[in-house]
Amino acid sequence: MDASDLAARVIAGDRRALARAITVVESTRGADRAAALVLAGAAAATGRQALRIGLSGAPGVGKSSLVETLGLMLTARGLRLAVLAVDPSSVRGGGAILGDKTRMERLARDPRAFIRPSPGQAGHGGIARRTRDAVLLCEAAGFDVVLVETVGVGQSETLVAEVTDLFVLMLAPGAGDDLQGVKRGIMERADLILVNKADGGQEAAAERTRSDHAAALRLMRPRPADPEGGPQVLCVSALEGKGLPEAWDAMTALADWRRERGHFAARRKAQARAWFEAEVREELLARLTARPDLRRAMVEVGAAVEAGEISPDQGVARIVGMLP
Ligand code: GDP
């Protein structure tokens, strides 16, 4: 089947075609990327727009549980939901999140849901590109909501925030007054914070965590794309489903607020531009490192810099001098 057949089937909502299309974009680059481009083109042609939600939080905070419970709530309301997983640790051959299907068992059987585990290996093209392409494909397939879940390690939160419309950060109750080792940069990117596990006697602890983080957020610089008062912090229980209708309302209300004021479109435009620039950088670098003389020079000049024979600046000048 050629790329345009595959694209047509994706647009028709064929989930097997969607899974296959994602595999294509995960495993190809360069010339084969034509396939992905056709698919992305198809996505643009449909004019479909899903609400793209990023979800991050430390392992064990309850992300999968939330995706399952919230996901079932949304599909029961008639919405179609795609769930994509991003797991940078899987690059090194570790276990992929969502890999064992005991997680999100019920959602996985739901005909309105599509769950895509994180690939076991990076393949070509990098995590960022594969995630972006997969999001686009899910959107072309007509899903109303595309949820991108990531484990809270490394650069993955940043990546997820860069491919989604709303970035949701999950926390667990407790851990004293400190901000649970959540890096400030991540807090600054959050559009909504959910304190999970507000159940079974942990309600008061969850509420303390909620108010601590709400206070911390108020001290941060206001962002133009936020309504007055900044990002909300809500208590939820993924286990019991408590607070999830409110959490969903907060997400859709924020998305609507941003749509009305142009922030929603502006974020996507900025993402598209950043995507383009990153691709150009990556492609240029790939072409340069494909030149054996440059690769050799990097090693030799690098050694000379290390030995103190020339300065780093002189080394840069030598490499740049080799460029066309
Ligand atoms: P993830 O690693 O962030 O995806 O976390 P999981 O969804 O796998 O949950 C980790 C553990 O926390 C599991 O044992 C869940 O049963 C438990 N858990 C998840 N959500 C809740 C919740 O709302 N309340 C309670 N009490 N436990 C929860």
Image (cartoon, rainbow, N blue to C red):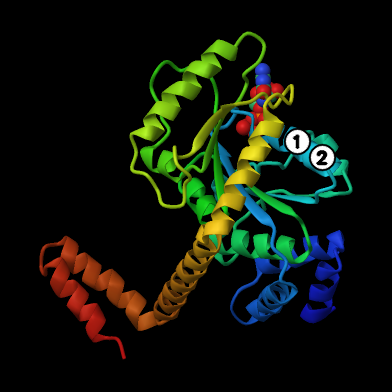
Q: Quadrant of residue 265?
A: bottom right
204 to the left or right of 243: left
Q: Is mark 1 within 8 Å of ligand 1?
A: yes
114 to the left or right of 64: right
Residue 283 in the image, given as x and y percentages of width and height: 47, 76
Label placed on residue 186: none
Rendered-image quarter of ligand 1: top right
Q: Is residue 2 visible?
A: no
Q: What kind of residue is marked 2? A: Leu
Residue matched to label 1: 68
Q: Nearer the viewer, residue 304 or 91?
A: 91
Residue 107 in the image, given as x and y percentages of width and height: 82, 40
Dot 2, crowdedness within 10 Å: few (<14), some or many (≥20)?
many
Which residue shows up at 69% across the image and 58% down it?
50
Mark 2 lies on a secondary structure that is: helix
Mark 1 lies on a secondary structure that is: helix
314 to the left or right of 303: left
Residue matched to label 2: 107
Residue 183 in the image, given as x and y percentages of width and height: 39, 37
Q: Quadrant of the N terminus?
A: bottom right
Dot 1, crowdedness within 10 Å: few (<14), some or many (≥20)?
many
Tell whether label 1 touches label 2 (CB within 8 Å): yes
How far apart, in angstroms, are the residues tagged by discs 2 and 1? Answer: 6 Å
